[in-house]
């Protein structure tokens, strides 16, 4: 287990939930995020190559894996590179997700969704993403393209997950 206060708080919250769907040892815990581009106020989404949202534009999200050691923010940092090619060090991670020293998080069906702001260079991220198109690691080629979309005028091909999370 990591030493982050926020991870300890999230585990306490999720384990104390009275909703069985959330408070179950059998439920694999996940983490997700919504990032607004500082310059355009658009959000970054990726077009999924696989899975339940195949072909749809969706958020950076994933399950906690054994190497994450029950650390939500470590898992999110890992997913941000795998899916969006955002290679955050801890300084930039905090710059993106902390506002006035605190994380902005909503819990959607038992999944913590971090909300943040960051200057996104979408062309650069797509260039990096293309370098992994033949990667041996399937986690690095989950997205066929990365896009910025207006959260107030969503395209038709966004996942139901995006629509649900933006309602908070
Ligand atoms: Zn942690």
Image (cartoon, rainbow, N blue to C red):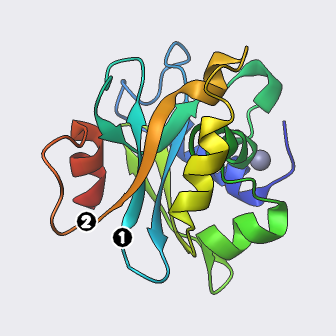
The part of the image, by quadrant, that contains residue 44 is bottom left
The residue indicated by pointer 2 is 151
Where's residue 132, x and y in %?
A: 67, 30
In the shown orientation, is residue 33 left or right of residue 87? left
Which residue is at 17% across, 52% downward? Answer: 155
Tell me where residue 95 appears, x and y as whole percent. Answer: 69, 75
Residue 80 position, x and y percent, is 63, 46
Which quadrant holds residue 15?
A: top right
Tell me the quadrant of the picture where the C terminus can be found: bottom left
Question: Which numbered marker is on residue 129?
Answer: none
Which residue is tagged 1?
42
Residue at horizontal 69 percent and vertical 57 percent from the top: 6
Instruction: Say few, some or many: other residues with alpha carbon within 10 Å of mark 2 (under 14 / 14 to 19 / 20 or more).
Output: some
Most foreground residue, 145 or 19? 145
Q: Quadrant of residue 21?
A: top left
Which image quadrant: the N terminus?
top right
Give the structural element (helix, strand or loop) at label 1: loop
Which residue is at the front of the view, 35 or 75?
A: 35
Cβ atoms at labels 1 and 2 below 8 Å apart? yes
Decide: is 62 above or below 60.
Answer: above
Label 2, ligand 1: CB separation under 8 Å: no
Point 87% across, 50% down: residue = 3
Kindly report the distance in space between the C-alpha atoms of the residues bearing marks 1 and 2.
6 Å
Using residue 103 as the reference point, say whether residue 162 is left or right of it: left
Dot 1 surroundings within 10 Å: few (below 14), some, or many (20 or more)? some
Left or right, 162 with reference to 135: left
| Residue under the point 75% across and 53% down | 87
Which is nearer the N-term, disc 1 or disc 2? 1
Q: Is residue 94 above or below residue 125?
A: below
Q: How many numbered circles does the render carry?
A: 2
Judging from the image, what secondary structure is the residue with disc 2 in? loop
Question: Is residue 84 at all visible to an observer of this figure?
Answer: yes
């Amino acid at each position: 287990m990591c030493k982050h206060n926020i991870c300890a708080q999230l585990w306490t919250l999720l384990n104390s939930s009275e909703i069985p769907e959330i408070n179950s040892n059998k439920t694999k815990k996940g983490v997700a995020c919504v990032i607004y581009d500082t310059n355009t106020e658009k959000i970054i989404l990726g077009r999924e190559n696989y899975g339940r949202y195949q072909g749809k534009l969706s958020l950076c999200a994933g399950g906690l894996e054994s190497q994450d050691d029950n650390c939500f923010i470590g898992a999110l940092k890992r997913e941000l590179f795998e899916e969006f090619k955002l290679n955050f060090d801890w300084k930039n991670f905090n710059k993106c997700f902390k506002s006035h020293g605190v994380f902005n998080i909503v819990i959607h069906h038992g999944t913590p969704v971090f909300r943040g702001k960051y200057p996104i260079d979408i062309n650069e991220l797509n260039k990096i993403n293309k370098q992994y198109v033949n990667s041996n690691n399937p986690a690095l080629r989950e997205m066929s393209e990365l896009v910025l979309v207006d959260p107030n005028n969503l395209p038709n091909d966004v996942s139901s997950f995006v629509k649900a999370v933006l309602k908070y």
